[in-house]
Structure formats: C-alpha cells, structure tokens
Amino acid sequence: MGKKFRQSFFRFFSFLFLLFAAAFMFSCSQSVQENEAAEETSTLRYTADALYKSTLWTEALELDRLSANVKSVDGISSKLNLTPLIVLASLPPQSSSIFPSLGSFGSLDTSLISKSLRETLTAFSDAISKYKDADSFVAKDSLYSLALFYADFKRIFNDCFELDKIDEVKAEPAEVSEEKTEDEIVGQDKEVNAETIQDTDTNETKNDTNIEEKSYFSSFKIGQPFLDGIYYQVPLKFFSDKATLTLCVFCYEDSGSWKIDQVQISDWEIF
C-alpha cells in the first residue's frame, strides 16, 4: 500500500514539475516574441514603411518626361555633363537684386533715388562734410530747419573739429574791413593802404580756400529711402577718423528740382 502511494505521489509530482516547466517555457517564449515585436515596431524603418503603406498615393504625372534621358539643354554646352546643379545655374535669376546693408543704418538700396535727387543729395552732403552753407539746397520756408541743424551740429562736434576756429576765420574779413576804414579815416598813405588791402584780400582768399577744401567727414553713404506721399525720407551717414554722423533728410520735388524740407540728426559717434 505504501509503495503504491509513493509511486502515485512521485508521478503526481513529476506531472506538476513538467506542467510548471512547460508553462515557464511558454511564458518566456511569449516574452521574447513580445520584446522582438516591440523592438521591430520602434525602429525608424518600421515607422517609414508603415507611413508609406498607409499613404494614399496618386498616379505619377508625366512619368515619361521624368524618366526621359535628356542629353542637351538650350544655353548649356553639349560638352558639359548635365546635372541638376548645372541646369539650375544656367537659369536666369528669379529673385530681386541683393543690396548690402550697413548695420543699424539699414540697406544701401538706392534704386528708388533718381539721378537728379542723387546729385542734390551728393552736393548737400559735400557742403555738410565741409561745414559750408547749404541754403541753396533747402526750401526757402524751411531754412529754420537748416539753422537748427547747424546749431546742433556745432554743439555736438565743436570740440571734435574745433569749429570755433572756423567761425573766427570766417569773421576775420569783416574785422579787417573795419580796420581798413579807420585807416582811411585817419588819412594814411594811399599806397600803403592799397598794399594792405591787397594783402588782406589775398589772406581772405586763402582763408576761404582752406575752409572750402577741408572736409571734416571724408565720405558718406546714401541709404534706402522711405516714400511718404510726395516726400522722400532719405538717410545719410557721414564718416571720418574722428566721428560719424547719421542724418535723416526729407526731400520733395518742386518744378523739376529737388528741395530739402527738413534735416534731422538721427545718431552720431565721436571716437
């Protein structure tokens, strides 16, 4: 009896062991398959294939032209090996012209500025660079704007360019003229007076020449204009080894000639 019981118990235990072993192997196999499936679905290739298969594609248009063997193109030498880059390079430019820019000053695109306006701006800029009168470029009823500009100009650049000395030189001919009149009143010799007057005129001419020839700003740039009705708002920037100056000039055309309506100092820098 005991022997049969032990045999039955051993068989039952063996059955349970085989059952658990089979279940364990099945679960491990399933886990491996699940991991492999997860790794496969997480790849970029699987995602791309799935996207390709799920996309509704239309029929190719002009398939014969796309697959044709093009051996020559108008405007390209037959000696060249045709490539997409060569074909693109042979096409005329489709975009607008590219213009340089100057930092915060902006674009140097002056394509909207006519020849006559450019000449006016150039002559005006030359007068400003030499600290000369620019009344002829400004409208008569706007001369106050130019006077205010010169006052600000002298206040800003007086020490930099020693503008007080220039104003003194400009005033010297009037003082000499007064002295000459006093000499004539006291009755000095006419020949001496004539020589003095001649020397004075010569010095005056030299002083004026020096004032005209000296440029406090060595160069300038004309920026891209902004159009506001009949007015052209044009930026100007002046350069020298001591300072820079940025102006905003408002211009309008009057009876075929350009006049400046307003001059504003936008920015400056002293080195």
Image (cartoon, rainbow, N blue to C red):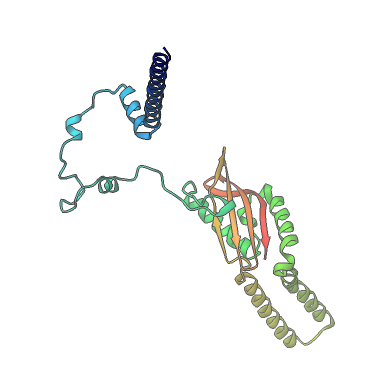
259 lies left or right of 80: right
Viewer-side residue, 18 vs 39? 18
- Residue 237 placed where, x, y %? 59, 57
118 lies left or right of 175: left
Question: Quarter-wise, where is residue 84 in the image?
Answer: top left
Q: Residue at x 29, y 23 (%)?
A: 57
Viewer-side residue, 122 vs 91? 91
78 lies left or right of 58: left
- Residue 169 placed where, x, y %? 72, 73
**Quadrant location, the C terminus:** bottom right
- Residue 83 placed where, x, y %? 23, 47
Q: Residue at x 60, y 54 (%)?
A: 137
Question: Quarter-wise, where is residue 27 in the image?
Answer: top left
Q: Residue at x 62, y 74 (%)?
A: 209
Question: Quarter-wise, where is residue 149 in the image?
Answer: bottom right
Residue at the extreme front:
1
Q: Residue at x 77, y 87 (%)?
A: 189
Total tally of numbered discs in the picture: 0
The vertical placement of 231 against 29, above or below, is below
Residue at the extreme right:
186
Viewer-side residue, 13 vs 86? 13
**Quadrant location, the N terminus:** top left
Residue at the extreme top:
1
- Residue 101 placed where, x, y %? 52, 52
Viewer-side residue, 161 vs 209? 161
The vertical placement of 144 against 65, above or below, is below
182 lies left or right of 193: right
The vertical placement of 136 against 161, above or below, is above
